[in-house]
Image: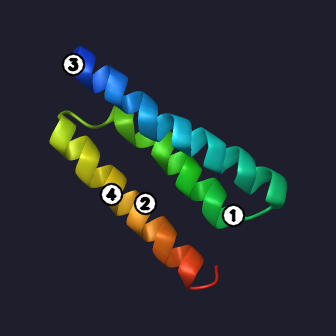
Amino acid sequence: MNFDPGLLILSLVPSGIGFVAFVYGKKQERWVHLVAGLALMIYPYFAATVVQMLLEGALIGGAWWWAVQSGW
């Protein structure tokens, strides 16, 4: 387990965004936001480096944006 302070602080950003998206998706009954929020809250636990965290976050955010733009 990695306890790099920079990685721990950086993980608060996507987790916070994910929490807001999850709550919004739950209240508005929009499953795309709910799933994206859940993914954003969980993936920092599995990121070993800052670069990996940024890339995974960008992929989840891009998939979320694409899904919303597609009308899901």
Discs 2, 4 touching: Cβ within 8 Å:
yes
Judged by depth in the image, the label closer to the viewer, 4 or 3, is: 4
> Closer to the N terminus: mark 1 or mark 3?
3
Rounded to the nearest whole Å, what is the CA distance between mark 1 and mark 3?
A: 32 Å
Residue on which the image places disc 4:
58
- Identify the element where label 1 is drawn: helix
Judged by depth in the image, the label closer to the viewer, 4 or 1, is: 4
Q: Quadrant of the C terminus?
A: bottom right
> Closer to the N terminus: mark 4 or mark 3?
3
Discs 4, 1 touching: Cβ within 8 Å:
no
Image disc number at residue 61: 2
Type of the residue with mark 1:
Trp
Which residue does the image show at 35% across and 51% down from the upper left?
57
In the displayed structure image, the side of residue 47 where residue 17 appears, left or right:
right
Question: Whole-percent x and y of residue 7?
Answer: 26, 25
> Closer to the N terminus: mark 2 or mark 3?
3
Q: Is residue 9 above or below residue 57?
A: above
Q: Quadrant of residue 34?
A: bottom right
Q: Quadrant of the N terminus?
A: top left
Residue on which the image places disc 1:
31
Type of the residue with mark 2:
Gly
- Mark 4 surroundings: few (<14), some (14-19) or many (≥20) residues within 10 A: few
Rounded to the nearest whole Å, what is the CA distance between mark 2 and mark 4?
A: 5 Å
Q: Is residue 35 visible?
A: yes
Residue on which the image places disc 3:
2
